[in-house]
Amino acid sequence: MKMIMAIVQDKDANLLSSEFIDNNVRATKLSTTGGFLKSGNTTFLIGIDDDRVDEVLQIIKDTSQTREQFMTPPVNLDATSDSAMAYPIEVQVGGATVFVLPVEAFHRF
């Protein structure tokens, strides 16, 4: 048994949730916030048998898209800093961050 924790961008969460339902994958969906962009993410917690881990990882990979997004860096109050830092920069967002962890015990009550 494994625990898969998948953190995806909110824009991909509904499609991924539907794919999990279509493929009989039980997942717990949590609303989370990313630390870098302060944008909404969704974290899925999935308890799955070892022989289905690759299948679930493929579903996540096929569903989670990377995209380019502009962000404005935080304002620095230091008067010596360069004013060019206030301009938006392009960053890559999306995709998925996935952790696969061993599970010692699993109970469903």
Image (cartoon, helix red, strand yellow):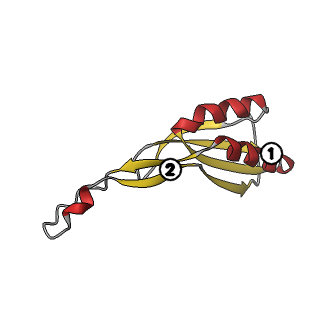
Residue drawn 44% across and 54% down? 91
Residue at mark 1? 55
| Crowd around label 2: few <14 · some 14–19 · many ≥20 (10 Å) | some
Residue 106: quarter of image: top right
Looking at the rendered structure, the kind of residue marked 1 is Glu
Horizontally, is 69 left or right of 60 in the view? left
Give the residue at x 49% y 53%.
92
Which residue type does callout 2 highlight?
Answer: Val
Picture quarter with the C terminus: top right
Whether 38 is drawn above or below 31: the answer is below
Residue at image position (75%, 47%) is 58
Specify which label sits upstream in the sequence, 1 or 2.
1
* Disc 2 target residue: 93
Q: Is residue 105 left or right of residue 17?
A: right
Q: Is residue 94 above or below residue 23?
A: below
Secondary structure, mark 1, is helix
